C-alpha cells in the first residue's frame, strides 16, 4: 500500500496499522481517513491477516481533528459527499478482531475511531475525550452507537455531552478500555494479544462471534439464540471444529483450515 499518513505492515498474521503524523500528534486528516479505510478493507479480505492492531506513532494515538485550518476546520461540506463517519469501513464491520493500542492521547475523532475497535488498551499517561461539542460540532465516527454499547447510556451521556478530558485511570474506570498500562507497554501488550488470537483462535469462529456480538444489542434473546444455533450448524462437524478438540487433547497449537474469505457463512436472518 502507498500511504502518507499511516503505516501498514503484516507480521506473523497480525496487521499493524500506525497513524503516522507524529509531528502533529497524529492529528486526523482526510488523507488519513482514506488510507485507514483502505487498510481496513485489505485486512478484511486478506486471509493472511488474522488480527489487527491500530496504534499511533510517537507519543500520541491521535490528537483529534487537524485544527491547522483555524476557523475553516469545520467549514460547511458538500452535502452529497460528506460523511461524519470519517472513513469506511468502520472497525466493527471487519471480520477480523481489531485491537486499539492507545499509546498516548486520544482526543475527538482520535477516541471515536478507537471506540469502533473490539478491544482498547490505554496508556496511563494519556488524556482521553470526545471533545467535539467543545469545538462547535458533535461526536462522529458512529460514537452515538458504539459508546452506549461499551459503557451504558448514562456514562456515554457524560462523556459525549460534557466533552471533558479524562485521565487514564478515569477512562479505565468508565470502561473505555480493558487495560491501563504505561505508554511504552501498550503496543507490545496489544501485539501479544493479537498474536494469541492469530495462532489460537479459529478465524471463522472469531468472525461470526464478532459480528453477532456487535449486532446483539438490536436483537431479542430469542433472535440471538436462533442466530447462535444457525451459526453453530455452519461450524460444527467441519475441519476447525475437529482440529480444535484434537489440538487441545494433543497439547499442540491448532492448524486451522477454514478461512474467512472462503468459508464465511451467509448471515442468518
Image (cartoon, grey):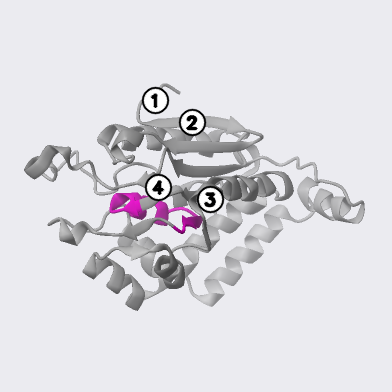
The range drawn in magenta is 106-124
Which residue, given by chain and number where applicable, does mark 4 sit on? Answer: 90
Residue that mark 2 sits on = 8
Q: Which residue is mark 3?
A: 186
**Residue at the image position 45 percent from the left and 69 percent from the top:** 175
Q: CA distance from mark 2 to mark 4?
A: 17 Å
Residue 217 picture location, percent across and down? 45, 69
The label shown at residue 251 is none
Residue 1 placed where, x, y %? 45, 23
Q: Name the residue tied to disc 1.
A: 3
- Nearest to viewer (mark 4 / mark 1): 1
The answer to whether 172 appears left or right of 132 in the picture is right
Mark 1 crowd level (few <14, some 14–19, many ≥20, 10 Å Cα): some
Q: Is residue 115 magenta?
A: yes
Q: Is residue 19 magenta?
A: no
Distance of mark 1 from mark 3, alpha carbons? 24 Å
Q: CA distance from mark 4 to mark 1?
A: 19 Å
Q: Secondary structure at mark 3?
A: helix
Q: Earlier in the sequence, mark 2 or mark 4?
A: 2
Residue 110 as seen in the image, left or right of residue 237: left
**Residue at the (55%, 56%) spot, across then down:** 210
Image label count: 4
Amino acid at each position: 500500500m502507498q500511504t502518507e499518513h499511516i503505516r501498514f505492515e503484516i507480521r506473523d498474521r497480525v496487521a499493524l496499522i500506525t497513524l503516522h503524523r507524529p509531528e502533529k500528534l497524529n492529528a486526523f486528516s482526510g488523507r488519513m481517513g482514506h488510507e485507514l479505510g483502505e487498510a481496513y478493507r485489505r485486512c478484511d479480505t486478506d486471509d493472511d491477516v488474522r488480527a489487527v492492531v491500530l496504534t499511533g506513532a510517537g507519543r500520541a494515538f491521535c490528537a483529534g481533528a487537524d485544527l491547522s485550518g483555524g476557523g475553516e476546520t469545520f467549514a460547511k461540506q458538500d452535502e452529497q459527499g460528506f460523511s461524519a463517519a470519517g472513513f469506511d469501513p468502520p472497525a466493527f464491520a471487519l471480520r477480523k478482531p481489531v485491537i486499539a493500542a492507545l499509546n498516548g492521547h486520544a482526543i475527538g475523532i482520535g477516541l471515536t475511531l478507537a471506540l469502533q475497535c473490539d478491544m482498547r488498551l490505554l496508556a496511563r499517561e494519556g488524556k482521553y475525550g470526545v471533545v467535539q461539542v467543545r469545538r462547535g460540532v458533535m461526536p462522529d465516527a458512529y460514537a452515538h452507537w458504539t459508546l452506549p454499547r461499551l459503557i451504558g447510556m448514562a456514562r456515554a451521556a457524560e462523556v459525549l455531552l460534557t466533552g471533558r478530558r479524562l485521565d487514564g485511570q478515569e477512562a479505565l474506570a468508565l470502561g473505555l478500555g480493558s487495560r491501563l498500562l504505561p505508554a511504552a507497554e501498550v503496543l507490545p501488550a496489544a501485539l501479544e494479544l493479537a498474536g494469541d488470537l492469530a495462532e489460537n483462535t479459529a478465524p471463522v469462529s472469531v468472525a461470526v462471534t464478532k459480528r453477532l456480538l456487535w449486532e446483539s444489542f438490536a436483537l431479542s434473546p430469542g433472535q440471538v439464540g436462533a442466530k447462535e444455533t444457525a451459526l453453530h450448524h455452519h461450524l460444527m462437524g467441519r475441519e476447525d471444529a475437529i482440529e480444535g478438540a484434537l489440538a487441545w487433547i494433543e497439547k499442540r497449537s491448532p492448524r486451522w483450515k477454514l478461512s474467512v474469505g472462503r468459508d464465511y457463512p451467509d448471515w442468518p436472518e
